[in-house]
Amino acid sequence: SVVAWGHGNGGGDSSGVQDQLRSVKQVQASGFAFAAVLDGGSVVTWGNPRYGGNSSRVQHQLRSVHHVEATSCAFAAILADGSVTTWGSSAYGGDSSEVQDQLRNVLQVQATESAFAAVLADGSVVTWGNPHYGGDSSAVQDQLRGVQQVHAAEQAFAAILANGSVVAWGNTDGGGDCFAVRDLIATV
């Protein structure tokens, strides 16, 4: 079960869903909301709706959920079939409709403050959300092949490739440009 405390509008009051919070296997937080993945793969959300605390729009899709990640105002759930369902503020990655057809065979999702990056089984990466915080990877997309893992800072992503090199994108002042240290991180 889950016990929440703090400001009620920020997820600190789970009394409205408390009876549903049984056999919880994961809890993920956005800025002012929570999402709990239950043992059967369903999801229960609470907190501020503007921060993803209301998943009713996509609740019918939240079955067989494997894992949930969050930006500050949105959530992304990886389903057992490798697809992704998102909800919350569209400006923070809560709307993945522009890339939905690409979100197949997803192995991992990471989040900056306002963007998501998904690693696919073929080693490619799909991004969405705020373009200045990593939601636009078009400048490095041709380098994002053989991706093993993606990690996130507040404003940027870094991908570790199969050859051990690193590719970064997002806000250049927030870690999205590793050009100056490229020789140091040629193999990680």
Image (cartoon, helix red, strand yellow):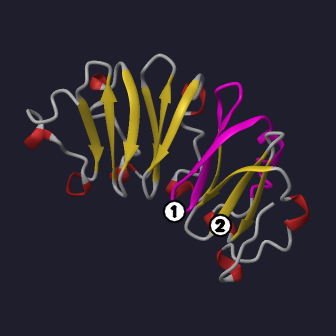
Label 2 packing within 10 angstroms: few (<14), some (14-19), many (20+): many
**At which x and y percent is residue 128?**
47, 43
Say whether residue 80 is magenta: yes
Say whether residue 188 is magenta: no
In the image, taking residue 92 as reference, residue 171 lies left or right, namely left
Q: Which residue is at a point 59% across and 22% down the rendered structure image?
A: 105
**At which x and y percent is residue 108?**
52, 34
Label 1 packing within 10 angstroms: few (<14), some (14-19), many (20+): many
Magenta span: 55-84
Amino acid type for the residue under numbered disc 1: Ser
**At which x and y percent is residue 54?**
74, 62
Residue at which label 1 appears: 72
In the drawing, what numbered circle is on residue 33? 2
Name above or below for residue 94 compared with residue 105: below
Name above or below for residue 26 compared with residue 82: below
**At which x and y percent is residue 122?**
47, 16
